[in-house]
Structure formats: structure tokens, C-alpha cells
Image: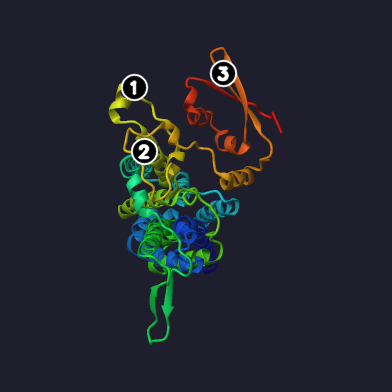
Amino acid sequence: MVEFLLLVGIGVALFVGFNIGGSTTGPAFGPAVGSDAISMTGAAALMAGFFLIGAWTIGRRVVDALGTELVTDPGVFSIESSIVVLFFIGGALFVGNYYGVPASTSMTAVGAIAGLGVASGELDWAVMGEIAIWWIVAPIVGFWVSGMIGRYLYPRINRWVAIVNTSGPLLEVDSSGVVPRPSAGPNTTRRELVGAAVVVGIGCLMAFSSGTSNIANAIAPLVSVGVDINLLILLGCAAVAVGAFTIARLDTLGSDITDLPLTAAIIVAIVSSVIVVGLSAIGIPASFVIIATTSIVGLGWGRATRTATLAEVARGDQSPNVSVGALTAEDPGEEAPPIGQEDDDAIPSREPHSSMTAAICRRSSLNCNRSVSVTVVSGTTRISWAMSPAVVAPLRSSWLALSTSLTSMNPTTWLLSSASSTG
């Protein structure tokens, strides 16, 4: 009976790894595949390889933290309880993959194991507190690092990243000799080759960081019941590879990162991956999704504040119109004005472009041919106009987000009619 339950537990762990492979490959290699720097099969292969390297080298530290340190008595991990914990983790990931909603595997795993620890009275609150503190600090660090890059370095990086895809293959392989020799395609430029290497390298870094943090989510409970950690790492990485080759969606804009301009995607990937690897090295399970989200916001904030100097902001002479849309203010390779010399009108609004609008409508089950009425009340003045549901949808859950994104008439009161239609 014990052997059967152990096989069930390993099967559930493989299911978790399978879903990790499906959910993390897209964010890691989406920009590389989208820019034709690598094929979908090549991206899956690199995902599997670098995930294994990250799991084997640093990931075992996070496995120890979740499996033996988060609870004061690892004996609470019976085979039955380990299966239940893994079912919760795998179920959350499966639902997230099915509905296309990004889920934090690390937070799911820590929450499930912490719940078991609380129920059994064996939760190590000091370790839980340390993890929780880093969960707060890490996104803040990601925000400010990205914010400083957005304000002072983003335009310069944007000039370097400009990738122009030429006709023909990026690489050609000469198989006439004993050893195949790759070479640049007939029309491939040096800039294009370097740019392709950069985006592929970033994907490999993200795959490595995922391995350092996410392998523990699949195998930590089973390590606590005595299963060999090396065997579980190999099995878990094999399941991740299967997920990367089968259910990973690399040909669609499935994540917020791949919806960004290429320059922003590269910066967010580097900042987030470095933070995740650093936390994994000290045994802290980190959420890439949350760190990346705050990095995106910080990068957009930093780029938008280039319209004013620090002295102007301090004196109150100018208040920049902060928007994540600032990341699209110039195309890759285009020169940006110096800080303080850019017009606020040059910063794009947050309204999505057509393809993103269509995606929002699909995900929100909205009719994009209809529009809703938005009313602004400022003092005794009342103004109404129609807005696309695709613009309102991402903001309707938070009045604060709605009022922040429409800052041009502050202070105001924003009223969103519940069911008015003008078309």
C-alpha cells in the first residue's frame, strides 16, 4: 500500500512539473520566438536544459527550505499529506494554465505547506516570516531598479536593442563535413545576429531562474518523506521538459511580459531573473510573476518621468503623466529627448493597441463593438463620454487604478455606469 501511495505521489509531482513547464516556457522564450530568433522546438529544448541546470545547482536549497525548514518537524509530511499538498499545487497551476491566468507557483507551494504546518502545529513562524518579508522586499527592489533603468538608461538600451529581421534564415548549417558547422544566413547582419543571441540568452537566464525556484514546488513534499532528492530533481525536470514541448504556448501573447516592447521585455526579464536567482541562492522561494509585474510598472514609471527633471518635480513646477504606455514612446533604435526636454503629449496613453484590445475583449467576454459611459464629476462640472469596454475592463475592479490612469483632470470623481450602452 505504501509503495502504491508513493507512486501516486510521484505521479502528482510529475503533474506539477508538467504544468510548470507549460506555464514558464512562454514568458521565458516568447520574445525570442516572436522575433524569429529561435524555433518553438529549440525554445522548449533550451527551457528543459537550463531548467535542469538551475534545479540541480541552486534549486536544491529551496527544496530544503520548503521540505525541512518551513515546518519544525518534517515528520508531518506523510505520504498522504504530501499527495494532498501536491494536488493543491498542481490543481492551482492547471487552472491557471487552462484559463491563461498567470499563477505564482512558489506562493501556491508555500501556502499549501504552511497550511499543513499550521494545522499540525509545526509551522516554523520565523522561517515563514523571513519568506514573507522577502516577498514584500523583492517586488519593491524590482520596482525601483527598473524605475531607475527606465528613467536614465531605457532610451539608450532601446537604441542598442533595435532588431531588424532580414529575409532568409538567421543561421545556416553546413552538414557536408563530419561535424556540422553553423554560419550566419546570407542576409543576416551582425546587429541582427547579436540581437538574436541576446533575446535567446535572456530566455536561458529565465529558464535557469525558474529551475532554481520552481523545482521545489514539485518535489519538496516528497523529499521530506525520504525519497532521494537527486532522483526527484531528474524526474521533475523531465516532466517540465514534457510540458515545455507539449502545452507551452509560445506563438501567442500569453503573458504580460511578451505584450511589452522587446526592450522592456528584456529589461524586465533580466531584473526579475536576477532577483529570483539571488533569493533562491539563500533558500527563499520567489514569485517571478509578482516581481516581473512590479518591474513592468517601475520601468514604465521611470520612462514616463523623463519629461521632468528632479528639480522641477521637487518645486512642483511639473507633474509627469505617469503611464506604462511610456515604454512605447519611441521605436527600437529611435533617439529619445534628454530628461526634462520631452513633451508630456509625447507619452502614449495606456489604451491598448488593436491586438491587445481584442485579447482583452476575449478574456473578459466583452463585446468590443459596444461602449460604456464614463462620467467625470469635478465640483459642479459633470462630463460624460463613451469608452471601449476593452479600456475599462482592466480597471473596473479598482476605482483607484481607474482614477490613477486618468490623471489629467485631478482632483475628480470617476463614475462608471454599470450597464449603459451607446452602441
Answer yes or no: is residue 271 visible. no
Which mark, residue 316? Answer: 1
* Disc 2 to disc 3, C-alpha distance: 30 Å
Answer yes or no: is residue 263 visible. yes
Q: Tell me which label, 1 or 2, sits earlier in the chain.
A: 2
Q: Name the quarter where the N terminus is drawn.
A: bottom right
Residue 245 left/right relative to 48: right
Characterize the local packing of mark 3: few (<14), some (14-19) or many (20 or more) Cα atoms within 10 angstroms.
some
Q: How many marks?
A: 3
Q: Nearer the viewer, residue 25 or 195?
A: 195
Which mark, residue 360? Answer: none
Q: Nearer the viewer, residue 231 or 169?
A: 169
Instruction: Please say if 242 is above or below 411.
Output: below
Which mark, residue 302? Answer: 2
What amino acid is labelled 3 in the image? Val
| Contact, mark 3 vs mark 1 (Cβ under 8 Å) | no
Characterize the local packing of mark 1: few (<14), some (14-19) or many (20 or more) Cα atoms within 10 angstroms.
few
Give me the residue at 59% from left, 43% from top. 357
Residue 203 left/right relative to 391: left
Residue 77 left/right relative to 353: left
Give me the residue at 32% from left, 36% from top. 339
Q: SS for tag 2? A: helix
Q: Position of residue 415 (x, y in %)?
A: 59, 24
Q: SS for tag 3? A: strand
What amino acid is labelled 1 in the image? Gly
Which mark, residue 377? Answer: 3
Instruction: Please say if 361 is above or below 174.
Output: above
Q: SS for tag 1? A: loop
Instruction: Please say if 112 is above or below 377.
Output: below
